[in-house]
């Protein structure tokens, strides 16, 4: 017989031979039912297990990063394509729809380049995710540097005014 089985049998027989603490001999039970004494049952306290961390923030960070990179690249290409298309137009009447489309593409690019990573940084800070907040803040700074290297904030605002008002 294995040592584990031997130990189990010894404990069972020893518990059966010795009466429970505070009980003298078999007789009427303390609750008055008149049966044999019952061995005290061991109550086991449940072990609290840590719940796994939710996975939705990872999906959110991935989605925001894809919108940031993909949207910025897409709208930048659309702004460039519309700018090349405007080079063929000579009259202001032909130029107005292209200016309006370029202004909307520029708004889309600014939203994807600046607002999306800033929203990710704010969300990560509210959720107390320090690393994600830092990385999204770094992404916002990198995008701002890249966008404002191409044109200053006043030039971008003037381009938006000119495109949306005309």
Image (spheres, rainbow, N blue to C red):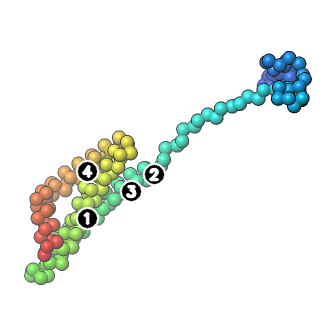
Distance, label 4 to label 3, CA atoms, is 15 Å
Label 4 or label 2, whichever lies nearer to me, is 2
Q: Which residue is disc 3 drawn over?
A: 63
Label 3 or label 2, whichever lies nearer to me, is 2
Q: Which residue is disc 1 drawn over?
A: 108
Q: Which residue is disc 4 drawn over?
A: 140
Distance, label 1 to label 4, CA atoms, is 15 Å
Proximity of marks 4 and 3: CB atoms separated by less than 8 Å: no
Q: Which residue is disc 2 drawn over?
A: 56
Category of crowding for the residue at label 4, using alpha-carbon neighbours closer than 10 angstroms: few (below 14), some (14–19), many (at least 20): many
Category of crowding for the residue at label 1, using alpha-carbon neighbours closer than 10 angstroms: few (below 14), some (14–19), many (at least 20): many
Category of crowding for the residue at label 2, using alpha-carbon neighbours closer than 10 angstroms: few (below 14), some (14–19), many (at least 20): few
Distance, label 3 to label 2, CA atoms, is 11 Å
Q: Position of residue 30 (x, y in %)?
A: 83, 25
Q: Nearer the viewer, residue 138 or 9?
A: 9
Proximity of marks 3 and 1: CB atoms separated by less than 8 Å: no
Distance, label 4 to label 2, CA atoms, is 22 Å
Distance, label 2 to label 1, CA atoms, is 26 Å
Q: Earlier in the sequence, mark 3 or mark 1?
A: 3
Q: Position of residue 13 (x, y in %)?
A: 86, 22
- Identify the residue shown where x is 83% and y is 19%: 23
In the displayed structure, does residue 30 sit left or right of residue 122?
right
In the displayed structure, does residue 131 sit left or right of residue 165?
right
């Amino acid at each position: 017989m294995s040592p584990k089985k031997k130990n189990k049998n010894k404990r069972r027989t020893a518990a059966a031979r010795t009466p429970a603490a505070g009980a003298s001999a078999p007789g009427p039970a303390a609750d008055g039912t008149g049966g044999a004494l019952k061995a005290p049952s061991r109550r086991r306290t449940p072990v609290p297990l840590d719940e796994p961390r939710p996975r939705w923030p990872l999906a959110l960070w991935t989605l925001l990063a894809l919108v940031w990179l993909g949207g910025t690249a897409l709208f930048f290409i659309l702004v460039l394509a519309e700018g090349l298309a405007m080079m063929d137009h000579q009259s202001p009447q032909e130029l107005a729809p292209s200016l309006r489309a370029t202004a909307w593409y520029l708004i889309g690019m600014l939203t994807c380049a600046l607002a999306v990573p800033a929203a990710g940084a704010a969300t990560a800070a509210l959720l107390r995710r320090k690393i994600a907040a830092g990385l999204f803040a770094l992404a916002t700074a990198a995008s701002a540097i890249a966008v404002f290297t191409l044109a200053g904030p006043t030039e971008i605002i003037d381009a938006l005014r000119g495109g949306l008002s005309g």
